[in-house]
Amino acid sequence: MNDLYYKRDDCRLCGSVDLDLAVPLAPIPIATPNFSIPDDDRDSPFFREAVPLDLYLCRDCGHLQVLHVANPEVQYGNYVYTTSLSLGLADHFQAYADTVLAARSPASDSLVVEFGSNDGTLLKCFKEKGMRVVGVDPARAIAEQATRSGIETLNAFFSLDIARQIRENHGPAGIIIANNVIANIDDMVPVALGVKELMAPDGVFVFETQYGADVIKDKLLDTVYHEHLSYFNVRPLAAFFERHGMQVIDVEHIETKGGSIRVTVQHSGGPDTVSAVATEALEEEDNDGLNSLGCYQGFSDEVEALRSRLNAIADEQRGAGRTLGGYGMSVGTTTLLAQFGLTEKIDFLFDDDPDKESALSGPGYDIPVFGSEAVYEKNPGAIIVFAWRYAEPIMAKHERYLKDGGVFIIPLPEVTIKKA
């Protein structure tokens, strides 16, 4: 492995080398607004080298994945994104904890372990209900912050050794949780071994992750970047856990991240039966052809059509002597700029967060970032809303821009033009 990334040549779920290029995508930098680079050297390869982002499909198990893996020590050791700052996520976690506890009815003082626990927002919900909690997270500063706030957090990547350490010090876990993290893990085998070791005989492993089927069906292109190495569907996951002495017993389709699944796993032969919903999910995936290349070709064609439409709009604006802005400075913006071929056509970005960096840097570009009030100072001919899920509140906040003749362009799931 070099300091930047490495490329694996086998499926991270089943180990097969029978992999096909399913969705060719434009390369993007490893560095994103989600983590900081030591010394913040904007000329380092982390910002300036374009790393392949192509999606590959395993012919044997049907898993969709990125094979070019960023150096995890740099990426997660310097992570700065915290869940408590994500709009609506704290409320989601409270409801999630209530749901899991109601379904499992654990004894008071049972152990709940979360890996990828970030600042402990979710574990706090369980602790408030009387559970003992332990977090595991590789981000040094965030793990220390969580521990200071009362959520014991081990600064580490979850593994068999860490699972044994927790079990020795705290006993087996009745509930193990992982939210929006397993898609970020390259080597899944240590995770499975750790879960198997730590989980009590009647315990469960419950995790949420982006649903690969939704990424393809709903064109959730802004969720594809090097942090997200896997785009999980139920069938490949079920086969993976079965190989490690566990079974998927329930699947719930949820709305977070534009489309996710909450999966419940127990030891093989555990106390619960497989739900009808889990069985139906397998059948639906098979019917949709998610383990064959055909549906992914359709996704690629749709992305190319969006790219052509947005470039036509950008060229029209620039040809008329008008500037072109973008709204939202995030990892999703990094992806969309590259996939839509707009890195040299966006003049500046706006963002509501006053603490954002002053520029979004990448291979061959440094796009200035301004606060949202600068919309009126810069007065671009059009603004592409890269934070497209929040397009309605953004446009409501900037009605004056529309009344003054401005145009908002919403790029996903279809290109939509909004005028006064």
Image (tube, rainbow, N blue to C red):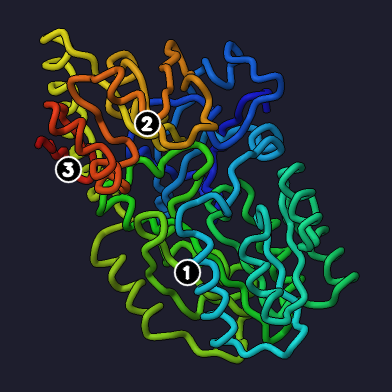
Read off the residue under disc 3.
414
Residue 262's disc is: 1
**Label 1, label 3: how many angstroms apart (C-alpha)?**
27 Å
176 or 110: which is nearer to us?
A: 110
Residue 409's disc is: none
Can you tell which of label 2 and label 3 is closer to the viewer? 2
Q: Earlier in the sequence, mark 2 or mark 3?
A: 2
**Label 2, label 3: how many angstroms apart (C-alpha)?**
24 Å
Q: Can residue 161 be seen in this view?
A: yes
Q: Which of marks 2 and 1 is nearer the N terminus?
A: 1
Q: Which of marks 1 and 3 is nearer the N terminus?
A: 1
**Label 2, label 1: how many angstroms apart (C-alpha)?**
35 Å
Q: Does dot 3 land on a helix, a strand or a loop?
A: loop
How many C-alpha atoms fall within 10 Å of the one at disc 3: few (<14), some, or many (≥20)? some
Q: What residue type is labelled 3?
A: Glu
Res 304 → quadrant: top left
Which residue appears at 53% of the width and 41% of the height?
A: 227
Q: Residue 219, percent across and down? A: 27, 47
Can you tell which of label 1 and label 3 is closer to the viewer? 3
Which residue appears at 42% of the width and 13% of the height?
A: 365
Q: Residue 247, percent across and down? A: 55, 76
Q: Do the residues labelled 2 and 3 touch (CB within 8 Å)?
A: no
Q: Can residue 309 be seen in this view?
A: no
